[in-house]
Image (spheres, grey):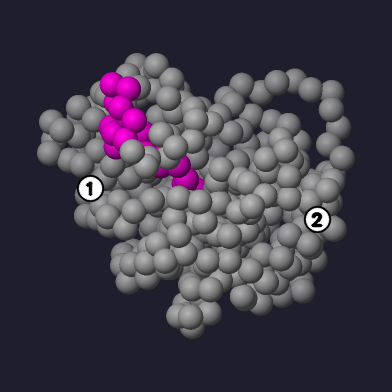
Amino acid sequence: MHYHRIPHSSLEISQLGLGTMTFGEQNSEADAHAQLDYAVSQGINLIDVAEMYPVPPRPETQGLTETYVGNWLAKRGNREKLIVASKVSGPSRNNDNAIRPNQVLDRKNIREALDTSLKRLQTDYLDLYQVHWPQRPTNCFGKLGYTWTDTTPPVTLLETLEALAECQRAGKIRYIGVSNETAFGVMRYLHLAEKHDLPRIVTIQNPYSLVNRSFEVGLAEVSQYEGVELLAYSCLAFGVLTGKYLNGAQPAGARNTLFSRFTRYSGEQTQKAVAAYVEIAKRHGLDPAQMALAFVRQQAFVASTLLGATTLEQLKTNVESLNVTLSEEVLAELEAVHQVYTYPAP
């Protein structure tokens, strides 16, 4: 395992990180602890959770992911060796993910969310605390085009950043990050931090995969020149890039089989792109999932590739992608497919 220093921080994170959003829904606590044990044994030190998890969000399960991870941390006694990251939910997008009344990114909500997360995780601090999605309506969660709006967000980015700064000064978080954010949002956070002497955001957690390379349009340049690097999630596009859903297949127990709401990667263009990518993998003797993960890992703007698995065997296969380095020939073939199916799944 290689480790990478996040710019503008002292965080040394593993090239692969463990995503946990299935803990508490598709994965039991025993499953979760087995995955955590294996991940750490392989050198993974980044554990990413969120107050909203597991997904799909339900009031009955909300917070279980952090509880499972917290119980594991307490049993293993290895907190100081790990980079634990969590997220505060943005404004409720529908009734499914409302955690608090008037759920906005202000001082009250951020303070309450953080204190509750710390309690569930059984720790005094987080290494990285991220805004899960923006306060303002913008193009994220499967939306590429920005829609002009006259709506004024009830909470400004400055108010959110000031609230996070207060939590940092209290010693409850070490560093701040954003998630599902745009180039405008990142640059605005950086401007406000410089102008008002507030903490700088150090990471962005956005989707990035062979079927969703929208990060390259504006955010990759921001990453290079401002040092806000990517914690890439959904790198297998909810498992679609394994090829297991091709030709209408619905594998038993798979996420897209169990939950009909996950349609982001099921469009016709995505299926055609996936079929082409899987064919490249077969032609070069590569596992499609490992090829897809290696592609993400090899991007200069990616600080860590988050792995999400529902079985330990899947996790092992994904971790073994570290042993795969894509040749120039394979990269050229992947790029040729990308030129045909440029943004099949935003």
Residue topped by disc 2: 109
- Write the start and end of the magenta stretch as one range: 227-251
Q: Is residue 208 left or right of residue 10?
A: left
Residue under the image location 20 percent in, 29 percent down: 280
Res. 338 image quadrant:
top left
Residue under the image location 63 percent in, 58 percent down: 63
Between 89 and 311, the residue placed more toward the observer is 311
Up-down: is 83 above or below 99? below
Distance in Å between CA atoms under marks 2 and 1: 43 Å
Quarter in which the N terminus is drawn: bottom left
Residue 324 covered by magenta stretch: no
Give the x, y percent position of residue 316.
Answer: 27, 57
Residue 236 covered by magenta stretch: yes
Give the x, y percent position of residue 29.
Answer: 47, 64
Point out the tag, 2 or 1, that comes first from the N-terminus.
Answer: 2
Res. 290 image quadrant:
top left
- Secondary element at tag 1: loop
